[in-house]
Image (cartoon, rainbow, N blue to C red):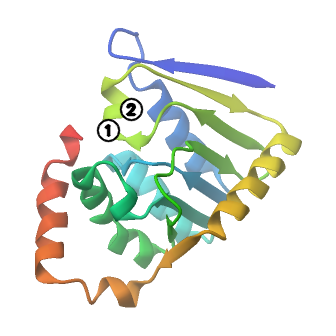
Amino acid sequence: MLQVVPSGPDLPFIDAIAAQFTAAIASAQERCWIATPYFVPDEPLSLALKTAALRGCDLRLLVPLPRNNDSTLVSLAGASYYDELLAAGCRIYEYLPGMLHAKYLLVDDRVAAIGSANMDVRSFYLNYEVTALFYDRRLTLDLADVFTKELAQALEVRPEARKQLSLPRRLGEGFARLLSPLL
């Protein structure tokens, strides 16, 4: 079964993709794996991610290594959420080979979302985007294999490494987070 979800500023439900992603993450029982080039969550998405991890869901986020991201500001804004996500039990990976262009979400073995939307405010509320939600076990498992292969080319972000960030880096992340509603 397939559901195509469009979003855009001229549609009656501007936040259709944001609502679908947040609901899917909130319903995850075993795992929720996300690959996105741009990660700047709004409050509902951030809360859904943290709550899923706190209830024991295997929550993994794959994003580009900051130096490979084509937007330093977006990369810094996204990183400003890492500490609270890690504290909740999320696992975060930074993709090494280059810019990560994949945009998908896996929930358990039952839902896979693939589309143009990033996990950021701009994609959720400003841009014209389209996402296909697949309710298919085989496709979800195949995409999980792809995710696992991409994780093999990524570094896991560790809480102890985050504690050693320089003051300029912390200030950069804090400044970028202030701008996150615009990114």
Q: Nearer the viewer, residue 110 or 115?
A: 115
Instruction: Point out the image quarter for the N terminus.
Output: top right
Q: Which mark is residue 161?
A: none
Residue at horizontal 24 percent and vertical 41 percent from the top: 183
In the figure, 150 relative to 115: above or below?
Answer: below
Q: Position of residue 105 (x, y in %)?
A: 61, 46
Horizontal side of 176 relative to 131 (left or right) equals left
Inter-mark Cα distance, 1 to 2: 5 Å
**Badge 1 element:** helix
Please tell me how crowded label 1 is: few (under 14), some (14-19), or many (20+) other residues with Cα within 10 Å.
Answer: many
Residue at horizontal 68 percent and vertical 50 percent from the top: 107
Q: Which mark is residue 121?
A: 1
**Type of amino acid at the residue the image marks with label 1:** Val
In the figure, 159 relative to 115: above or below?
Answer: below
| Residue 72 visible to the viewer | yes
Please tell me how crowded label 2 is: few (under 14), some (14-19), or many (20+) other residues with Cα within 10 Å.
Answer: many
Q: Which residue is mark 2?
A: 124
Residue at horizontal 65 percent and vertical 61 percent from the top: 150
